[in-house]
Image (cartoon, rainbow, N blue to C red):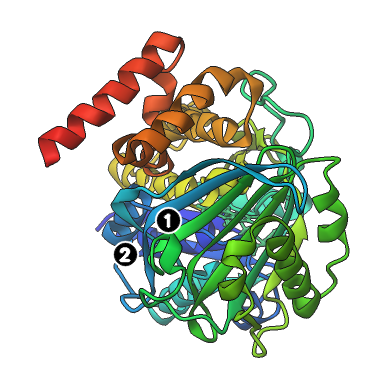
């Protein structure tokens, strides 16, 4: 019998935990290093994000690991509204509510990671609680055929230089406020004017940012709602987000935002309550969207690979981070098992280039579209009004959250016209 492949993974967030369990199920000998215990990963930290899996990534995740959250409320569309102006003199510019052509679900990443880690350890996987330092990596890499760093946006990223050619932004494009809330059900009477409890509610403001709220499965209470606020730098929303210091103040700020800018949704928002079981149900921050080189080196020059947020950090406006990390994990697991040995620096770089071509690049560009990047004004300027006219176009627009690849074909006005025409034609075929 040949020796099993030995893989070290550093970081037990959703990407590290998923990769570890999937590799283990293929007979790979995995050692997973985490700076926190399994219990602390679940209960002593906020979720690193909402991590809605839209369509394709959800399917990939189910194929790779299985479906453990069959009771989680899914979302099937995106009730979208764009307004402009200040409270009392708001103008609605767009209002549309397409169904997706897929199913989306947001499950607390702490729960997903916890459940995967628990299964990994139960099946005999080595879980080492240790904050790994750059100094530790040499011995870890020497002891394994391949070392993967899934340490998120902050941990050990200095080993991986920023890829200047692939990185577009040098600073965050939004200030973020995320929070999960209880108190509101998911029946058709909820947000009846906006998709009836099974649609995400996405409110955009032309000058200030975006507010999104969608069905969520929270680690302690299960069915709940997840709110995400995105404030453009310099907008008055930044100050409101900055005043949040706990879950209760997060709820106050969220309620005031809807009262001032989206009063038609206020009756639902006023029913939301803080999740008493989870004092870490909220998060504030900002992400500089960054692409890093996938290969780093330990002190003695051994190559190590970056995966997940460590190599690709997205602004969450288009929900691409966990989705792309899971898709990367699935491809990497298959490639590791197929190769079996000799995980050279060139091989690691090749895997990432494949991932960039298959998903990462398109995911980054879709994020730019939803950030309102001026380079995509020619796309947004046609696509959003066309979505207002025809739900088929709205569905295609939000289809990009699941399958972002078509955005790489949008270079001219004619390309956008073709995308719109194709969406309408596809709807005719379906009907
Ligand atoms: C507000 C918000 C909303 C989001 N919404 C979505 C969404 O809807 N859909 C989506 O797909 N994505 C979304 N994302 C992105 C998604 O949450 C992240 O991409 C994903 O959680 C990253 O997972 P990860 O495992 O790569 O990193 P992390 O979750 O950051 O995990 C890294 C782990 O490594 C550990 N670690 C760090 N350093 C060390 C060390 N030196 N030694 C040992 N361990 C270490 C950390 O403690 C952590 O446990 C959102 C993000 C944010 C901020």
Is residue 57 or residue 77 the one in the foreground? Answer: 77
- Quadrant of the image containing the N terminus: bottom left
How many marks can you see?
Answer: 2
Does dot 1 land on a helix, a strand or a loop?
A: strand
Residue at 52% x, 27% y is: 380
Whether the residue carrying mark 2 lies under 8 Å from ligand 1 is answered with no
Q: Is residue 172 left or right of residue 219?
A: right
Q: Quadrant of residue 297?
A: top right
Residue at the farthest front position: 89
Spot occupied by residue 246 in the image (x, y as percentages of width and height): 80, 76
Q: Residue at x 38, y 72 (%)?
A: 73
Instruction: Specify few, some or many for label 2: CA neighbours under 10 Å numbering under 14, 14-19, or 20 or more.
Output: some
Is residue 255 something one can see in this rendering? Answer: yes
Is residue 307 at least partly visible in the picture?
no
Q: Position of residue 124 (x, y in %)?
A: 41, 77
Quadrant for ligand 1? bottom right
Left or right of 315 on screen, residue 402? left
Where residue 238 appears, as percent x and y from the top left, is 83, 51
Asked if labels 1 and 2 touch by Cβ distance under 8 angstroms, the answer is no
Q: Earlier in the sequence, mark 2 or mark 1?
A: 2
How many C-alpha atoms fall within 10 Å of the one at disc 1: few (<14), some, or many (≥20)? many
Tell me how far mark 2 sits from mark 1, CA to CA.
22 Å
Residue at disc 1, CB closer than 8 Å to ligand 1: yes
Q: Which residue is mark 2?
A: 25
Q: Is residue 186 above or below residue 28?
A: below
Residue 123, above or below 414: below
Q: Which residue is identified by label 1? A: 53
In the image, residue 87 sits, relative to residue 74, either above or below, namely above
Identify whether 143 is placed above or below 82. below
Residue 288, percent from left and from top: 73, 39
């Amino acid at each position: 019998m040949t020796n099993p492949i030995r893989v070290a993974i550093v970081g037990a967030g959703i990407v590290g935990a998923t990769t570890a369990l999937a590799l283990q199920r293929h007979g790979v000998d995995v050692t997973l290093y985490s700076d926190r215990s399994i219990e602390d990963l679940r209960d002593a930290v906020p979720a690193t994000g909402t991590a809605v899996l839209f369509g394709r990534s959800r399917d990939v995740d189910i194929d790779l690991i299985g479906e453990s959250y069959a009771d989680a409320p899914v979302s099937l569309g995106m009730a979208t509204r764009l307004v402009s102006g200040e409270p009392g003199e708001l103008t609605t510019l767009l209002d549309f509510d397409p169904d997706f052509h897929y199913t989306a679900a947001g499950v607390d990443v702490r729960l997903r990671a916890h459940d995967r880690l628990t299964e990994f350890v139960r099946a005999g996987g080595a879980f080492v609680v240790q904050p790994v330092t750059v100094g530790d990596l040499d011995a870890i890499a020497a002891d394994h055929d391949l070392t993967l760093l899934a340490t998120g946006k902050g941990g050990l990223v200095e080993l991986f230089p920023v890829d200047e050619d692939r990185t577009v932004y040098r600073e965050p494009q939004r200030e973020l406020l995320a929070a999960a809330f209880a108190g509101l059900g998911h029946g058709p009477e909820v947000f009846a004017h906006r998709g009836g409890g099974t649609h995400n509610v996405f409110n955009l403001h032309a000058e200030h940012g975006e507010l999104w709220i969608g069905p969520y499965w929270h680690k302690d209470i299960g069915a709940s709602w997840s709110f995400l606020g995105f404030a453009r730098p310099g907008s008055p929303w930044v100050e409101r987000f900055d005043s949040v210091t706990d879950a209760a103040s997060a709820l106050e700020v969220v309620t005031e935002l809807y009262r001032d800018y989206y009063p038609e949704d206020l009756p639902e928002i006023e029913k939301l309550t803080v999740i008493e079981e989870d004092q870490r149900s909220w998060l504030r921050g900002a992400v500089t969207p960054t692409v890093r080189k996938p290969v780093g080196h330990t002190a003695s020059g051994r190559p190590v690979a970056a995966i997940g947020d460590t190599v690709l950090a997205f602004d969450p406006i288009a929900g691409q981070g966990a989705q792309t990390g899971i898709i990367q994990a699935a491809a990497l697991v298959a490639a590791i098992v197929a190769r079996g040995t000799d995980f050279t620096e060139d091989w690691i770089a090749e895997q990432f280039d494949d991932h960039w071509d298959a998903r990462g690049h398109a995911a980054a560009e879709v994020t730019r579209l939803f950030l309102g990047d001026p380079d995509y004004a020619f796309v947004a300027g046609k696509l959003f009004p066309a979505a207002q006219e025809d739900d088929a176009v709205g569905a295609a627009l939000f289809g990009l959250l699941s399958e972002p690849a078509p955005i790489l074909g949008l270079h001219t006005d004619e390309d956008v016209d073709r995308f719109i025409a194709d969406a309408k034609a596809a709807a005719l075929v379906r009907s």
